[in-house]
Image: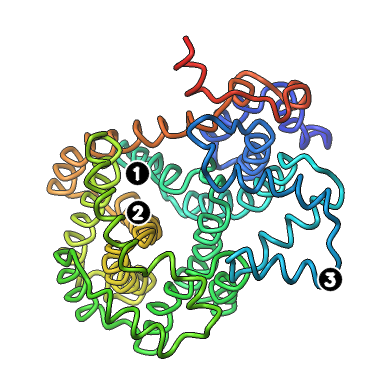
Amino acid sequence: MRPKNQKSFHLLYFVLSPFFTLIYYLNNYKKRKAKNVMWLFTVFYAATFAVGRENQGSDINRYIEEIFYLNNYRLNQNGILEYYYSSGEFDVLRTILAFIVSYFTSNGYFLIIVFGIIFGYFYSRNIWYVLERLEGRIKSFTRILIFSLFLIVPIWFMNGFRFWTAMHVFLFGLLPYFFEGKRKSLIWCFLTPFVFHFSFLIALVPLSVYLLLGDRIKYYFITFIITIFVSNININQFNKLLSNYAPKILIERSDSYTDEKKVEEFRNSENESSKVWYAVYYGKSLKWVLFFLLIYYYLTYKRELLKAHNKKYLKLLAFIFLFSTVANLMSTIPSGGRFLSLANLLAIVFIILIFQNYSTTKNEKMIAFLATPFLIFFIVVAIRLSWYSLSMTAIIGNPIIAIITFGENISLNDIIKGI
């Protein structure tokens, strides 16, 4: 019989070395406490978050400075509403969190810890929702896919708290619906644009179409294929549609996404970023591998997916094609390409479970062999991006050291550049 106090051993190990405790539990992901260790580490990462030079103009830096401002200017109810309206944010959670934290402290780094608590919960639950459904001995290619799953919207993306947390919340609502038929879980999806990030009103469009039309996978597949080759949309028509039917507050909040000048600047910046080749191609390498695998599995497993016990995979694949159609269109306007990350998350969940839980053919082994270098390239570059907020304390430190270095951590990127 296991001693009762042994249940808390993971906490003791975590206090001594969070990073290596996480590595152990990732390798033993079936242990009951594993997903909570992932959650705890996300909070620890937030507590050791380094706002490097590359982050000086980012949202996270603005959020930190905002806490100092709000703490020094105690606003009344009217002031709070006026401040929210001037913030340009349609959703409410981030502003509410800022006011609550600023009531107790002027140190904005405490807000990042709150971000870590919220982001880490949904992140860990989504990852383990997939891991808990793996059958048999883990295949080599499955391991690479799982690494990629961790890195599509990783924990260091909490520096863009609103959008990336919204993405994990949206996924948190979708997965139980498709795999367990829990329609109530979709409430998370419908709350997302109002609580976390208003742009997820766009994500509700394909979800609503799917709920209305059902599994019309053939038509979704056709539109998916068509939009792969679409590189431009008529932004004038998009703006006209928005101005005719959207509420005034939503139009004001979306100006930065749909303004024609912004679109042109966005496309020019895309060309400029090609100078750093790996920053351009790491995302594309993932997208094209996943898109190719989706097409392969659809064409190969069509009949298999129609069987009653596989209907959950059919439903998910149909929605992936529908959502990817919208994501492909959105990728042509500023910041709209971020929706491809949700399409990638959905796609990789489907591919992981199909590849792992079904017998693998020779063709699939060959495809996995060819896809592996592209996914490894994605993994390496994605980890490299963590250096802009990853501190040495997060790797070799512990909560005690984190208290000492709190708010003073230097990013790994800055350390390497300073050597």
Q: Which residue is mark 2?
A: 348
Asked if residue 1 shows in the view, the reply is: no
Q: Residue at x 29, y 34 (%)?
A: 376
From the viewer's perspective, is the residue at label 1 or at label 3 nearer? 3
Label 3 sits on what residue type? Answer: Gln
Which label sits on residue 145?
Answer: 1
Q: Quadrant of residue 40?
A: top right
- Horizontal side of 347 relative to 169 (left or right) equals left
Label 1 sits on what residue type? Answer: Leu
Kindly state the secondary structure of the residue where label 1 is placed: helix
Dot 1 and dot 3 residues touching (CB under 8 Å): no
Q: Position of residue 418 (x, y in %)?
A: 48, 13
Q: Position of residue 113 (x, y in %)?
A: 70, 43
- Horizontal side of 341 relative to 154 (left or right) equals left
Q: Which residue is mark 3?
A: 77
Q: How is the image coloured?
A: rainbow
Sequence-wise, which precedes: disc 1 or disc 3?
3
Label 2 sits on what residue type? Answer: Ile
The foreground one among 194 and 168 is: 194
Say few, some or many: other residues with alpha carbon within 10 Å of mark 3 (under 14 / 14 to 19 / 20 or more). few
Sequence-wise, which precedes: disc 2 or disc 1?
1
Q: Residue at x 45, y 43 (%)?
A: 150
Dot 2 and dot 1 residues touching (CB under 8 Å): yes
Q: Residue at x 52, y 68 (%)?
A: 176
Q: Residue at x 26, y 53 (%)?
A: 290
